[in-house]
Amino acid sequence: MHVLKRLLKVLPLVFLMLLFGCDISPEVRAQKAFYSEIDLWAHFSTEAEVKVFQAQVNYFNQQHDLVRINAVVIPSETYQKTIKDAALENALPDIIAVNSNYVSLYADQKFIIPMDKFLTDSTRNDLLVPVLNQGAFNGRLYMVSPETSGLVLYANKEKLLASGGSSFIEQPEYINLDDFEGLFDRLAKLDDDGVVMDMNVLDYNNWAAQMLLSQLSESSLMPIDDITGSSSIKKALLKISSWGEKGYLSTNVANALLNGDIALSWSLLSDYPELKKSMGENLVMIPFPGFFSDVGSKYSHSVTRGWGWSVTKQCDDVQAAMRFIEYIFQNKKSIEINGGSKLMPATLKTLKKVNYFTSDREINFINNQNVDSSSNSYKIPPDAYFSVQTEYINAIKGKASSSRLH
């Protein structure tokens, strides 16, 4: 099979986790003048995700006579190396799963191609703005995601109002860092132990690093070496560390926000359905503070991070590849399959269909980024995220090292 010929150039067959959607016979193919086979490589974290994707591929293949998806799931621990090796051998499949951290790198190296001119208007208009943002580079769209996750700042509405924080509930497009710290001080005075916010992102420090790097790179398009070692990043980390030193922060305290023990929680977007079910109208989302004075609203509301589908430079039939990618967003059956995930669906249509949010207020909050989705022009290689993570973990524990950060 064509898909195996490509894969075996870079990965022994023994490492394959799953293969489905095989080639059809040459006789059948000859009867289809415009028939296309699309090779696709993916990786997933759980067997449940594999089953969801397999159902999507199988259903697509059943419904389409002229396009067939040959999908291979590769173990996550070898996936990135497999992609890199295949690119060097010009052996990439037609579609690959891409983590949003790698979009700028792959696009810059021309492993993947722009997709925006192939998207239908209905799909483009239905995709959430932050989903478009995470797949954009240098004015073009290189990746689209069927679902996404990220970080959001949750708040106990009653505690905010008691501390004079009504302006935060009104969802301003940008929160000044000084105003945010003022809220911290007032909340701490109202709390018995002075703990204000649960930094429930200790295990997701790469997302928090993304927020800092994205804010800074958006504000000043400096070389990546300067970003990761810049005085601005150091200042932001020391600021977070000062919150830890004052005792304002806790880490991974189970149900602290649910139980009313804490006013703020920096946590995963996928936690929203459970939190909303328990807290009702007392749960609100508020914007992140801007750590750098000249940053606008783009990264003020949430940090969206996920994976999605990209079309590679090896693809000979981009329209056929896009037919499958758009199917994932538009087809009723696929929406039902995707709706079983805890992650946030990437389209307005699916959000409303699966009742992920309880009102348009929450949808507008996440979607109100107020920027052109193709404006991203910075490159942040994946290694840059990891270089900030260790210091970030130290910072939220109030143990940022001045010798390393000055």
Image (cartoon, grey):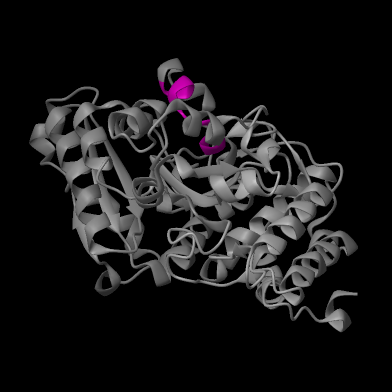
Residue 131 placement (x, y as % from top left): 51, 37
Residue 255 placement (x, y as % from top left): 43, 65
Evaluate whether residue 379 shows in this view: no
Q: Identify the residue at horizontal 67%, vertical 53% (top origin).
A: 211
> Would residue 305 be found to the left or right of residue 327 on screen?
right
Quarter of the rendering containing residue 146? top left
> Would residue 110 be found to the left or right of residue 27 on screen?
right
- Looking at the picture, tell me which residue is in the foreground, 382 or 277: 277
> Would residue 321 be found to the left or right of residue 161 on screen?
left
* 33 w.r.t. 283: above or below: above
Which stretch is magenta? Answer: 123-132
Residue 254 placement (x, y as % from top left): 43, 70
Q: Identify the residue at horizontal 41%, vertical 27% (top origin).
A: 348
Q: Could you tell me which quadrant the C terminus lies in?
A: bottom right
Quarter of the rendering containing residue 186? bottom right
Evaluate whether residue 131 shows in this view: yes
**126 inside magenta stretch:** yes
* 259 w.r.t. 29: above or below: below
Return the residue found at the far top: 121
Q: Identify the residue at horizontal 83%, vertical 55% (top origin).
A: 223
Instruction: Label the magenta part by its dominant secondary structure.
Output: helix
> Would residue 368 be found to the left or right of residue 12 on screen?
right
**301 inside magenta stretch:** no
- Count how many numbered circles sit on residues in the image: 0
- Looking at the picture, tell me which residue is in the foreground, 177 or 193: 193
